[in-house]
Amino acid sequence: MSNPASLRRISIIGAIITALCCFTPVLVILLGAFGLASLTGYLDYVLFPALAFFIALTISAMWRNRQHADSR
């Protein structure tokens, strides 16, 4: 992405959504409603790496935004 501000916005939104699914029973309730409750045991294998990815992406976007602001 050429615009660091939009990358930062997308990464923060992704981190918030992933954190909500990690630390609240939102995803467990949704999976149970759709009859996929047996998949809840595997959520940690997906959600924690996704959260780490979005946090790293947020840090990278903030770093790029700072460099972009300094070059002006």
Image (tube, rainbow, N blue to C red):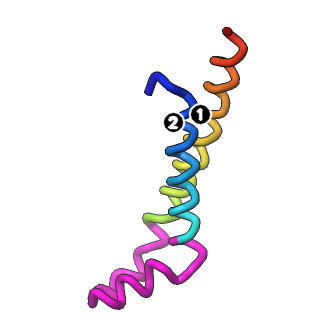
Asked which secondary structure carries label 1, the reply is helix
Residue 23 place in picture, x, y as percent: 60, 75
Up-down: is 49 above or below 23? above
Is 40 contained in the magenta span? yes
The majority secondary structure of the magenta stretch comes to helix
Going by the numbered disc 1, the residue's amino acid type is Ala
- Residue located at (55% from left, 28% from top): 4
Q: Which mark, by number, is residue 21?
A: none
Residue sitting at 44 percent across and 84 percent down? 28
Quadrant location, the N terminus = top left
Residue 10 position in % (x across, y down)? 50, 44
Position above or below: 23 against 30: above
Task: Check contact, mark 1 vs mark 2: CB within 8 A.
Answer: yes
For residue 72, what is the image quadrant? Answer: top right
Specify the amino acid type for callout 2: Leu
Judge the density around disc 1: few (<14), some (14-19), many (≥20) Cα neighbours within 10 Å: many
Query: Please, which residue is most extreme toward the left here?
Result: 35
Nearest the camera: 28 or 69?
69
Q: Is residue 52 above or below residue 3?
A: below
Task: Kindly report the distance in space between the C-alpha atoms of the residues bearing marks 1 and 2.
Answer: 6 Å
x and y, in percent, of residue 48 in the image: 53, 63
- Please provide the residue range marked out in magenta: 21-45
Answer with mark 1 or mark 2, whichever residue precedes in sequence. Answer: 2
**Depth check, front residue: 59 or 70:** 70
Tell me what residue is drawn at x 67 percent, y 9 percent. Answer: 71
In terms of depth relative to the viewer, which is nearer, 37 or 34?
A: 34
**Which residue does the numbered mark 2 point to in the structure image?**
7
Q: Is disc 2 surrounded by few (<14), some (14 to 19) or many (20+) residues within 10 Å? A: some
- Give above or below for 60 relative to 52: above
Q: Which residue is mark 1?
A: 61
